[in-house]
Structures are given as C-alpha cells and as structure tokens.
Image (cartoon, rainbow, N blue to C red):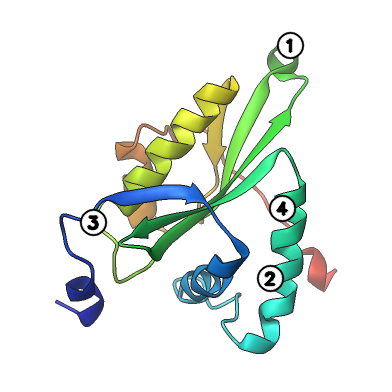
Amino acid sequence: MSDAHAAVPEAEAIVVAPATRADLPAIVSILARETLLGVRDSADPAALPAYERAFDDIAADPRATLYVARIGGRVVGTFQLVFFRALLRQGALLAHAEAVQVDPEIRGRGVGRAMMDFAIAEARRAGAGSLQLASNKQRHDAHRFYERAGFEKRLDGFKIDLAGH
C-alpha cells in the first residue's frame, strides 16, 4: 500500500462539488499524472496561468461546471460537466462529461463511481436526455468502469489535433 492510500482513510466520505480556483494546482497535478497516453498537461507552476484562464472561462459559462471529488478535504478526482442543445430528438438537452480523472493513487476506492453518480444525477436534474463521455481506446480499465457505471459503448469517435494543422 502506498503512502497516498494510507493518507486517505477508507471510511471517509467522498464529496463531489464545484471546483474553486484554489483547487487548480491539485486538479492539474491529477491531469498531469495521466501517463497512459503521454503527458499532455503540465504541473509546472509556469503553466498555471493557462489553467487559470481556462478555469475562468469555464466558470463564466452557465452551461459548464468543473467539479472535484474530495476525501477529507483533499482533491482526488475531477471532471467537467457541459450541457448543450442538439437538433436531434426535437432539440434535446444533452450532457457531456469531459476530462474524467481520478488520482492514480486513489483509483479503485469509489471516487470515479461517486463522480459518475453525481454527473448522472446532475444531468437528470437539468432535464438532459442523455449523458455521454469519450474515453481513449487504450483506457481499457476505464471502459470497464464506465460499463459498470451504466454507460453503453455505442459510438466510435474521431478526433483531429488542430494545434498541428
């Protein structure tokens, strides 16, 4: 058992709530530790202003909320929930969960499930017709987790990196 596991008592409640600007260093640290696909995010303090600008934009958008999961006050997970209208299904309101990440040292402790249960409840409360998310093809453990959480694998997605084009 790692020190991180020992630092978070098993019985402590997982609390999901909107992120604050003060949460940014912890959020970025979690994002930067996702190594399966190579590090795209940087925990370097010099990068913090870019994350602060993004946080401010998200906070100003009434259709989007950045959330964190905390155990004992410590940020251990994050995701962004975005709502949008589509012409499909007679103008249905849809929800999308983005950047769903749990601290690698805490995975398997119910944090992801608490976040997804919260996202599903928020999407229902808002009247969304569905909640979707995308997960990289290589994240097999995450795919199994999402299926256990009630998500169905229905789509194949495509992406183009616009920074290189």
Q: CA distance from mark 3 to mark 1?
A: 39 Å
Q: CA distance from mark 1 to mark 2?
A: 36 Å
The C terminus lies in which quarter of the figure?
bottom right
Which residue is most to the top? 90
Q: CA distance from mark 3 to mark 4?
A: 28 Å
Q: Residue at image x 49%, y 72%?
A: 26
Residue under label 3: 109
Q: Earlier in the sequence, mark 3 or mark 1?
A: 1
Q: CA distance from mark 4 to mark 2?
A: 10 Å
Secondary structure category for the residue under label 4: helix
Amino acid bearing label 3: Arg
Q: Earlier in the sequence, mark 1 or mark 4?
A: 4
Q: Earlier in the sequence, mark 1 or mark 2?
A: 2
Residue 70 in which image quadrant = bottom left
Residue under label 2: 51
Amino acid bearing label 2: Tyr
Does 136 appear above or below 93? below
Q: Earlier in the sequence, mark 4 or mark 2?
A: 2
Judge depth for marks 3 and 1 and give the one in front: 3
Mark 4, other Cα within 10 Å: few <14 / some 14–19 / many ≥20: some
Q: Position of residue 111 (x, y in %)?
A: 32, 53
Residue 140 in which image quadrant = bottom left
Residue 101 can be seen in this image: no
Q: Residue at image x 69%, y 61%?
A: 55
Q: Earlier in the sequence, mark 3 or mark 4?
A: 4
Does 159 appear above or below 156? below
